[in-house]
Amino acid sequence: MSEVSENLKNVLSKLPSSVKLVAVSKTRTPEEIMGLYNSGQKVFGESKAQELVPKYEELPKDIKWHMVGHLQRNKVKYIAPFVEMIQSVDSLRLLKVIDKEGEKNDRVIKCLLQMHIAEEESKFGMSEDELCQTLESDDFKKMKNVSINGLMGMATFTEDEEQVRKEFKMLKSVFDGIKEKYFQSDDNFSEISIGMTNDYEIAIEEGSTMVRIGTALFGDR
């Protein structure tokens, strides 16, 4: 069994059946991605549109691509025809562009709203107030080509497990409040995307339904 197959088996053995695995393939070659694909992994995450598009064109069409990095509004048009989910929606302005491009491509694009939960200022995402303002806005209420499927967040990059746990707990609490207030009867609003290679086991304990893992699968760069 190849190293990536072994890595995939190891990671999957730690995931409950309720948790989906997104293999983060940014900076990885098509050959590396095919190693995981041939071991059964079909959901991959990329951070840059300009890296995602050529991979989409070259690799098998049954791969489900998730955009997990910061997305500039002028890049949405390149991925809108095929992207399975945009996890990193961090503003109403971006969501409006995704809706517009979804309409052009005659599809409804699944989105997660990214919440800022880390102490680092460099991480993107909305505050709880901004999330609510977005969902209450007239612009959002008119949208027909996006589906809000849940929330995404990135914890502080730290050895302090309690800090990470606290941030994940906060996102889960906000998710529960938003579900109750805006999506009570919408089964699509069900995803909590938290947890990466360093902290996914804590994330699962705190309610993650989707983990984004790169290094633990592909090995160190």
Image (spheres, rainbow, N blue to C red):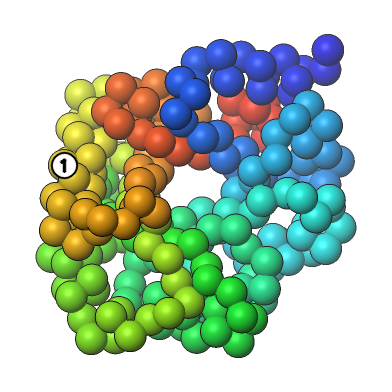
Front position in the image: 194 or 100:
100
- Give coordinates of residue 86: x percent, y percent: 50, 61
Q: Amino acid at mark 1?
A: Ser
Residue 4 in which image quadrant: top right
Read off the residue under disc 1. Answer: 173
Front position in the image: 132 or 122:
132
Residue 178 in which image quadrant: bottom left
Question: Which quadrant, please, contains the N terminus?
Answer: top right
In percent of the image, x 35 and y 66: which residue is there? 90
For residue 170, side relative to residue 156 (left or right): left
In percent of the image, x 70 and y 40: which residue is there? 42
- Give coordinates of residue 217: x percent, y percent: 64, 27
User: Element under label 1?
Assistant: helix
State whether residue 47 appears in this view: no
State whether residue 13 appears in this view: yes
In percent of the image, x 77 and y 60: which residue is there? 56
How crowded pointer 1 is (Cα within 10 Å; few <14, some 14-19, many 20+) is rated as: some
